[in-house]
Image (cartoon, rainbow, N blue to C red):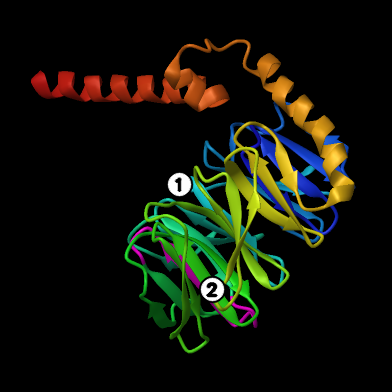
């Protein structure tokens, strides 16, 4: 299954397992091999001709989109949750420890710290603020580049916040609540737009023209919500996995392995890719027992996780033995 989809200036990037596929006008122009990265891709971002990829084993890899060569590799303290670039081209990475680090030619520098998992970060529309969201219902607005100065918190959610987006001058936030919040620039609520179900998990928010496209876990449709809370829907053949907007068109990867797009010119080309992506994991997963639930869940990261667990068990056992002696 394609777990992530990302738009660069030129390419539509698909992340599946440890591999990347770059599409241009519906055609595959590059697909990396299985050994290009150390583990499954968990986050992705880009700036001009540079692609940033975060992996399950806490690596951050910068890749040239011109040559597809690795430009730099960093090690994150924790698994990354979001990768974005500053206006000047430096990489920012949020992680599951609740921190945001800046990665450049120098040593990674801590910019922001939350007390729970960071779920999303974006720059304000005027690039003067860095906005971060976490699992504890909070949205923090920090000055940029002086992120130690916290301008305000946005407190309107009762559940975790999983995704942020800008629709014009309105910040839009969503997560575990059955509504989206459209925020004014002064931190007040412009509109609270109710969604279809009381128990939801917003997978992603993306701006499509004058609406926000909302992908919700286990809901086989995309909700399009405007700034006044009006909703229309796009039906899907399966539940969504990831969402992005590329060249003014919506792209949604599906749990059944397919790809939905609002661009009719790309739909036929993507159907052929769907078949390739549906068959391709068979050869990649041949060495794993399909009936084993842990292997099926972790996929190619199973052996690395197994070795890490065995190392921890030996370490703990050694400590107990020394204590007993």
Q: Which residue is mark 1?
A: 78
- Residue at point 48% right, 11% down? 291
Answer above or below: position of 275 versus 57. Answer: above
Say how many tags the image has.
Answer: 2
Q: CA distance from mark 2 to mark 1?
A: 37 Å
Relative height, residue 238 to residue 172 (above, below): above
Whether residue 67 appears in this view of the structure is no
Disc 1 on helix, strand or loop?
loop
Figure quadrant of the N terminus: top right
Residue 152, above or below 117: below
Closer to the chain start, of discs 2 and 1, is 1
For the point 77% across and 54% down, which residue is it? 50
Q: Residues within 10 Å of mark 2 (few under 14, many from 20)?
A: some
Secondary structure category for the residue under label 2:
loop
Locate residue 155 relative to residue 142 in the image: left or right: left
Bounds of the magenta span?
A: 124-137
Q: Is residue 169 left or right of residue 138?
A: right
Between disc 2 and disc 1, the foreground one is: 2
Q: In the rendered view, tell whether residue 324 sits above or below residue 42.
A: above
Q: Residues within 10 Å of mark 1 (few under 14, many from 20)?
A: some
Tell me if I can see residue 137 in this picture. yes
Instruction: Give the percent coordinates (x, y) of residue 58.
Output: 52, 41
Where in the figure is residue 162, as x and y percent of width and height?
47, 58
User: x and y percent of residue 71 in the render?
Assistant: 75, 48
The residue indicated by pointer 2 is 229
Q: Looking at the rendering, in which quadrant would you find the C terminus? A: top left
């Amino acid at each position: 299954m394609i777990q992530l989809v990302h738009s660069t200036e030129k390419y539509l990037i698909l992340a599946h397992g440890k591999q990347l596929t770059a599409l241009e006008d519906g055609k595959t122009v590059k697909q990396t091999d299985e050994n290009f990265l150390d583990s499954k891709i968990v986050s992705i971002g880009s700036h001009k001709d540079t692609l940033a990829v975060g992996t399950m084993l806490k690596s951050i890899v910068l890749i040239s989109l011109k040559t597809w060569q690795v430009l730099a590799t960093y090690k994150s303290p924790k698994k990354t949750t979001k990768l974005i670039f500053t206006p000047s081209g430096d990489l920012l990475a949020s992680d599951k420890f609740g921190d945001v680090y800046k990665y450049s030619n120098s040593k990674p520098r801590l910019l922001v710290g939350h007390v729970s998992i960071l779920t999303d970060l974006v720059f304000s529309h005027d690039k003067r603020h860095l906005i971060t969201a976490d699992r504890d219902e909070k949205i923090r607005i920090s000055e940029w580049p002086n992120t130690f100065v916290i301008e305000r918190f946005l407190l309107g959610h009762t559940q975790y916040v999983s995704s942020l987006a800008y629709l014009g001058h309105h910040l839009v936030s969503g997560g575990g609540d059955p509504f989206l919040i459209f925020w004014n620039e002064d931190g007040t609520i412009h509109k609270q737009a109710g969604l279809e179900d009381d128990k939801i998990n917003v997978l992603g928010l993306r701006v499509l023209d004058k609406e926000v496209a909302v992908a919700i876990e286990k809901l086989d449709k995309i909700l399009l919500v405007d700034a006044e809370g009006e909703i229309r829907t796009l039906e899907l053949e399966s539940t969504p996995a990831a969402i992005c907007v590329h060249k003014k068109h919506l792209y949604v990867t599906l749990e059944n392995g397919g790809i939905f797009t609002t661009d009719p010119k790309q739909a036929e080309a993507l159907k052929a890719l769907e078949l390739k992506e549906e068959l391709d994991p068979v050869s990649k997963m041949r060495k794993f027992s399909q009936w084993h639930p842990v292997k099926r869940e972790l996929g190619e990261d199973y052996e690395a996780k197994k070795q890490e667990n065995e190392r921890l068990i030996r370490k703990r056992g050694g400590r107990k033995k020394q204590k007993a002696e």
